[in-house]
Image (cartoon, rainbow, N blue to C red):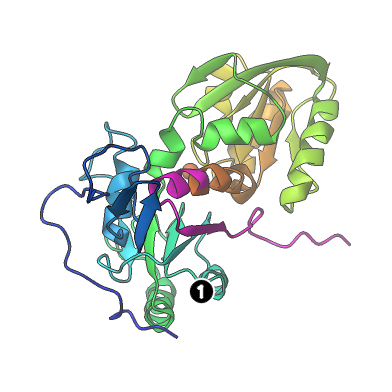
């Protein structure tokens, strides 16, 4: 077990720079590797990257990000720890952190919170159980010697490779015909809502969710499917954008509000697990980190539905 004190160096005072050439030539492969690299006649000594530097590099992908308000920051561990290997996951469950270490990672990039609250229980007190569990998890993180950062706001908004794009591709919907920030609408072959729901379920099955909840009229013909990004997937917003079938996540879809509305009006609403809708975008996040950290191992911890599906 490594300790958090190992492999550290002071945080940079200014904007991080990720490569330090020892011969006068430019190259595209600027990034942190731990050792000197040889490219033909040219020798480079590339600086290693710390967790904080990777966090800055990921944040820089979306220049409009508000640095004061974003949750994309170092959540736990040592920001100055030099990255040895990275594990990417949707939710940093304790078990996922153990898996990360088993894969050789000392740095975890997670999309969702580590400590049971969007602001990691820093801003508003919640039930004492969550605070107790946070203390226990902090001890585990220290024992494991890992640093955890969040990449949430950037990955939810980034065009082409961010969450809604990858989610649409995962569902086999192709490219969106309409897009507004976190929301996408796709033109699809006309078919009853129940048939489209079955097609979507055949995709979500691989992420641990073989059954989907369908509200509204199952025979309503669907020509446009709307999806969102995590909790930014409100059915009413997707219907406003012209979707005639909305796919929304469980953490935002209340059966007694939008469920009742859809059953009363017939508008089809499919409810999917939050994790299924976002874990599919962790592969593209890992790919981006590989670009930023050439030579460093970056693994994805496979996740999907955050629960076990039990049938009677
Ligand atoms: Fe998200
Ligand atoms: Fe989310």
Query: Magenta region, mostly helix, strand or loop?
Result: loop
Q: Position of residue 103 (x, y in %)?
A: 56, 70
Q: Residue 156 versus residue 272: which sits nearer the camera?
A: 156
Which quadrant of the figure contains the C terminus?
A: bottom right
From what the image shows, is residue 156 above or below residue 79?
above
Q: Residue 82 versus residue 300: which sits nearer the camera?
A: 82
User: How many dots with numbers?
Assistant: 1
**Is residue 56 toward the left or the right of residue 109 in the image?**
left
**Is residue 224 toward the left or the right of residue 178 in the image?**
right
From what the image shows, is residue 94 above or below residue 191?
below
Residue for point 64% across, 47% down:
276
From what the image shows, is residue 10 above or below residue 298?
below
Residue for point 17% across, 62% down:
11
Q: Residues within 10 Å of mark 1 (few under 14, many from 20)?
A: many
Q: Using the rendered image of the protein, determine whether residue 228 is visible from the camera's viewpoint.
A: no
Give the residues drawn in magenta, as a range: 287-312
Q: Residue 269 versus residue 30: which sits nearer the camera?
A: 30
Residue for point 11% across, 50% down:
14
Specify whether residue 288 is painted magenta: yes
**Is residue 188 toward the left or the right of residue 93 in the image?**
right
From what the image shows, is residue 168 above or below residue 311?
above
**Is residue 158 toward the left or the right of residue 184 in the image?**
left
Figure quadrant of residue 302: bottom right
Q: Position of residue 223 (x, y in %)?
A: 73, 14
Q: Position of residue 77 (x, y in %)?
A: 32, 71
Residue for point 51% across, 28% down:
160
Q: Residue furthest right?
A: 312
Figure quadrant of residue 1: bottom left
Q: Position of residue 209 (x, y in %)?
A: 75, 50
Residue that mark 1 sits on: 101
Specify whether residue 155 is painted magenta: no
Q: Using the rendered image of the protein, determine whether residue 38 is visible from the camera's viewpoint.
A: yes
């Amino acid at each position: 077990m490594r300790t958090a004190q190992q492999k550290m160096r002071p945080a940079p005072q200014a904007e991080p720079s990720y490569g330090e050439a020892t011969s006068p030539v430019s190259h595209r492969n600027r990034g942190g590797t731990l050792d000197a690299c040889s490219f033909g006649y040219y020798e480079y000594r590339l600086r290693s990257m710390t967790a904080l530097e990777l966090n800055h590099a990921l944040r820089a992908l979306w220049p409009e990000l508000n640095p004061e308000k974003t949750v994309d920051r170092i959540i736990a561990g040592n920001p100055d720890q030099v990255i040895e290997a990275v594990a990417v996951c949707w939710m940093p469950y304790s078990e996922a952190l153990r898996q990360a270490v088993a894969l050789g990672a000392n740095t975890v990039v997670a999309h969702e919170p580590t400590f049971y609250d969007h602001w990691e229980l820093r801003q508003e007190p919640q039930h004492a159980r969550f605070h107790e569990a946070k203390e226990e998890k902090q001890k585990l993180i220290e024992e494991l010697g890992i640093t955890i950062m969040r990449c949430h706001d950037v990955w939810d908004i980034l065009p082409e490779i961010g969450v809604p794009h990858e989610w649409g591709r995962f569902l086999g919907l192709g490219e969106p015909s309409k897009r507004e920030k976190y929301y996408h609408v796709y033109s699809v072959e006309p078919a009853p809502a129940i048939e489209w729901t079955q097609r979507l379920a055949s995709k979500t099955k691989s992420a641990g969710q073989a059954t989907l909840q369908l509200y509204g009229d199952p025979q309503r013909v669907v020509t446009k499917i709307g999806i969102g990004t995590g909790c930014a997937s409100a059915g009413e917003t997707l219907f406003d954008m012209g979707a005639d079938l909305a796919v929304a996540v469980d953490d935002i879809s209340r059966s007694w509000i939008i469920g009742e509305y859809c059953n009363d009006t017939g508008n089809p609403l499919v409810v999917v697990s939050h994790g299924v809708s976002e874990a599919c975008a962790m592969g593209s996040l890992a790919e981006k980190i590989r670009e930023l950290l050439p030579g460093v191992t970056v693994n994805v911890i496979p996740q999907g539905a955050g629960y076990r599906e039990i049938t009677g």
